[in-house]
């Protein structure tokens, strides 16, 4: 789960695994796999970073590609 800010200033917690797309319109629009769309104040790069950090924390992606490549050698 990641915490973001709606346009009205209220915090919302989103399941990062349900994010389908993140668009940079005048505001950041997140589309979920269920068709729901959520506008947030955080810029796209910040949302992407939060999603990546979440996925690393739960073990869905590795820390760095370098460490993955060195394991296979």
Image (tube, grey):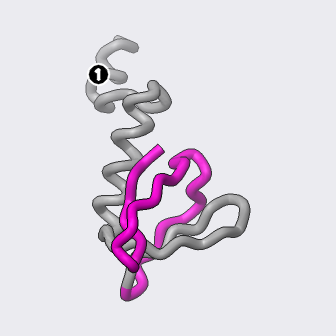
Magenta-drawn stretch contains 29: no
Percent of width and height locating residue 57: 38, 29
Kindly identify the residue that appears in the image at 30 percent across and 62 percent down: 45
Please give the residue where the numbered disc 1 appears in the rendered image.
Answer: 67
Kindly identify the residue that appears in the image at 39 percent across and 78 percent down: 7
Q: Does 63 sit above or below residue 47?
A: above
Q: Quadrant of the C terminus?
A: top left
Magenta stretch, residue numbers: 1-26
Q: Residue furthest right?
A: 34
Q: In the figure, residue 19 lies in which quadrant?
A: bottom right
Kindly identify the residue that appears in the image at 39 percent across and 53 percent down: 3
Give the crowd class for mark 1: few <14, some 14-19, many >=20 residues within 10 Å: few
Judged from the image, the secondary structure of the residue bearing numbered disc 1 is helix
Magenta-drawn stretch contains 12: yes
Q: In the figure, residue 54 lies in which quadrant?
A: top left
Percent of width and height locating residue 70: 30, 17
Asked whether 71 or 27 is in front, the reply is 27
Percent of width and height locating residue 4: 38, 60
Q: Does 37 sit above or below residue 67?
A: below
């Amino acid at each position: 789960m990641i915490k973001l800010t709606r346009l009205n200033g209220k915090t919302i917690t989103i399941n990062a695994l349900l994010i389908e797309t993140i668009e940079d319109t005048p505001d950041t629009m997140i589309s979920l796999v269920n068709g729901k769309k959520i506008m947030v104040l955080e810029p796209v790069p910040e949302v992407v970073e939060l999603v990546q950090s979440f996925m690393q924390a739960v073990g869905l992606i590795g820390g760095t590609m370098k460490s993955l490549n060195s394991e296979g050698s």
